[in-house]
Amino acid sequence: MIAECQALLGPDAVLTEPEDLIPYSFDGTAALKCRPRLVVFPRSTEQVAAVLRLARDHGLAVVTRGSGTGLSGGSVPVPQCVVLCLQRMNRILELDERNLTLLAESGVLTQEIFDRADAAGLFYPPDPGSIKISTIGGNVAENSGGLRGLKYGVTRDYVIGLEVVLADGSICWLGNKCVKDVAGYSLRDLFVGSEGTLGVITQVLLKLVPKPAARQTLLATYGQLEAAAETVSAVIAARIIPCTLEFLDRQTVRCVEAYAAVGFPLEAEAVLLIETDGHPAAAAEEAERIEEIARTHGALAVRRARDPAEAARLATGRRSAFSALARIRPTTILEDVTVPRSELAAMIRLIQRVARESGLQIATFGHFGDGNLHPTFLTDERDAAEMARVEGAMRTIFDEAIRLGGTITGEHGVGLAKKAYLRAQLGDASFALLKSIKRSLDPENRLNPGKIFD
Amino acid sequence: MIAECQALLGPDAVLTEPEDLIPYSFDGTAALKCRPRLVVFPRSTEQVAAVLRLARDHGLAVVTRGSGTGLSGGSVPVPQCVVLCLQRMNRILELDERNLTLLAESGVLTQEIFDRADAAGLFYPPDPGSIKISTIGGNVAENSGGLRGLKYGVTRDYVIGLEVVLADGSICWLGNKCVKDVAGYSLRDLFVGSEGTLGVITQVLLKLVPKPAARQTLLATYGQLEAAAETVSAVIAARIIPCTLEFLDRQTVRCVEAYAAVGFPLEAEAVLLIETDGHPAAAAEEAERIEEIARTHGALAVRRARDPAEAARLATGRRSAFSALARIRPTTILEDVTVPRSELAAMIRLIQRVARESGLQIATFGHFGDGNLHPTFLTDERDAAEMARVEGAMRTIFDEAIRLGGTITGEHGVGLAKKAYLRAQLGDASFALLKSIKRSLDPENRLNPGKIFD
């Protein structure tokens, strides 16, 4: 296999030495690690197809990988597998200004796509926390979310076409530049969020939208968590859908300030970071109404960013939450339970209770507008007893999310990290359906085996 | 089977007499007809599941049906089948104002859903031409489009959860009220647009959005079709996404005026009906800019609706296009090819050339903003020679749509009407994938067999 890959891709596109394999042995879920047999770097769809055929001939599993920033172990290798790293397929192939579409190879960084659209007066809204370093192919495979889900949706909502290579090496184009297309099942939607288990995504055709003309940023500070949750409900009840509606708890705020000093108020029990966008009159009016609603719902203070620089500083504060928290203890486990927005307060109360009862450090931040919370465990993987408590705490949190009509993962994927909980969420019939789809598309279980389910 | 269904559902919920079966023997695609063995009217998901189990035990095919307004033969019975008519499952189960969702049984009319949302200050944007008489279950099964696709998307974009009954009678809930959920493949998206071939959709959970505060309507008249197409390109190039961007050709305009007298200009070669919506300042400003763009791109006249009544009259004109055209000849065949927006002018030129060369009457209208055209054949199904020319003309139009990167069906579905063309659009690998999904979910080919593909 190694010699054949070298002949096919060139010797500089194949890694086999143990020390070279280490960086490809884990992803953002640092606690999960496994060394692959080899790592290959194809430069074209045809090369990907050829590698898949070789892997089939040699009976090897294939794990596809972009930048490896995933947070559920989706791109962690399985023993003796081939890692198919798409980072060298990194060209933006077309920006079509007439149809408002962008065609990119899977290895392009998502930030580059945002920037290219932005330069043309267009907007690619999905905005995962990893946007600067994650690839668009990885975003599509995980159906990444981000900070603008409430108003703009997630990655899926912008994928209108995909090129995929199937387990047998055949190449399919799914979708096209049409705004409407109902010719056959939406296979494209099946591959979005399939975590590398159904095929290898090699090209992505994205929908762009006009860039919003204006933006307003607010920071609301609360002495009580409940008041922040009530503000969110009241904003939605007022029929306002902000672009961003982020939440940080006391511990996260303090860590962020210590790390980035963006000006978050240290006395806060909770902070909401809210952005409105669109027509200047609409963005301004919405911001004003939100400010009023926040004040009548118990905000201690509401601050409006005076200029884009201040807005950017506040956004940076929110974006650095994970990095800031990661400095506190040796191991940081970022969860992403999601509940219907109306159940946010109940979910947060449970997380606080779990932290209190288990004695664990759990900081929480997240996308309040989406009901998407990131309870973040600050722990130490070397302490087996503490890790057992983490495991128990997680199960309690996931069970409650399911009970509240939510999901065990809003934007990180199932991967390895959550497969023990998936069946409980989906129920037996849906879970069986998932597996039958997998068997139908990858009958030899060669693509990212053991992810999502066993 | 008949006796068992009567025992299960009650005698008033089973039709078997030939004269009773006639209304359930066809759909909106009038040329396609087939009498079923029986028609049943379940009132609950459990009854649907029981009927599916009975059908399996008796080896009968099942064709699900709402109002039967489909335009591709999707709900036309197959010989000796059971028609599962969901019209009596017609309750709106919940409007959740905190999470902006609506839960309905499949048989609810889409207009009722729109109205219920509207009364709560909310908006259900999908707007198929049949909205007053089609059911939400049918809309989801066909992934219906409509007049607001450009800005608001299609039915799929508002489906966040589904209850489906599989071929073996098992019941699955797919999705939930969360804004974000990446737990497993998006099976929900697989069922949206599956045309009754993968399972029976019994409940639909829909996302609602705040109702736009204002709306502006414009009517632009053109002496040349090209000028209308150029206006559309220029509007998009100006980074404006109107809510509606409809087109009617000369023949359609004249038929509509004779039928509904809404005030369309009879001298026009083409008419664009454009709506903007949103914040009052945004809607007004966009309408102004569009008016300017239309004038500089050769519009003979641009009229702004002075009040909602005039706007409604113009919208009614557009909505009555099909009915107005249907009066001209005995048989009316409404097609729905779709191309990338940039290829609209090329597609329309081809349709005109085909009409000229074949001597057929083809009127064209449609959703210009979506690249979604309805070339409408005014013909007579009793004239075999003319029907052969219609068939040839269609094939030419579909081939060109595929060549231009478009689709044979933008919003009507494949059903029976277009299955001969599907493989050419998808290519062999994708087509094989569709069939493998079908085999996996319905191994005995019991659900709507022979639709989409053989």
Image (cartoon, coloured by chain):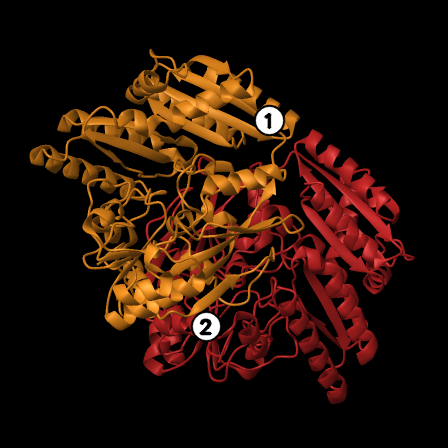
Chain colours: A orange, B red
Q: Position of residue B242 (x, y in %)?
A: 69, 44
| Residues marked 1 and 2, same chain | no
The subunit carrying tag 1 is A
* Vertical arrangement, residue A304 with respect to residue A208, above or below: above
**Residue that lies at the very extreme toward the bottom in this rendered image:** B385
**Residue A345 — which label?**
none
Say whether residue A402 is left or right of residue B372. left
Residue A404 position by quadrant:
top left
Report the residue marked by disc 1: A283
* Vertical arrangement, residue A361 with respect to residue B60, above or below: above
The amino acid on which the numbered mark 1 sits, given as a three-letter code, is Ala
Residue B351 position by quadrant:
bottom right
Residue sitting at x 45%, y 25%: A315
Say whether residue B393 is left or right of residue A324. right
Say what secondary structure mark 1 lies in: helix
- Disc 1 residue crowd, few under 14, some 14–19, many 20+, Cα 10 Å: many
The amino acid on which the numbered mark 2 sits, given as a three-letter code, is Ala
**Would you say residue B448 is visible in this rendering?**
yes
**Would you say residue A439 is visible in this rendering?**
no
Nearest the eye: B357 or B117: B357
Say whether residue B333 is left or right of residue B203. right
Q: Position of residue B269 (x, y in %)?
A: 87, 59
**Residue that lies at the very extreme toward the left in this rendered image:** A385
Frontmost of labels 1 and 2 is 2
Say what secondary structure mark 2 lies in: helix
Residue sitting at x 76%, y 64%: B348
Q: Position of residue A302 (x, y in %)?
A: 47, 14
Q: Position of residue A114 (x, y in %)?
A: 52, 39
**Residue B429 — which label?**
2
The subunit carrying tag 2 is B
Residue sitting at x 29%, y 44%: A408
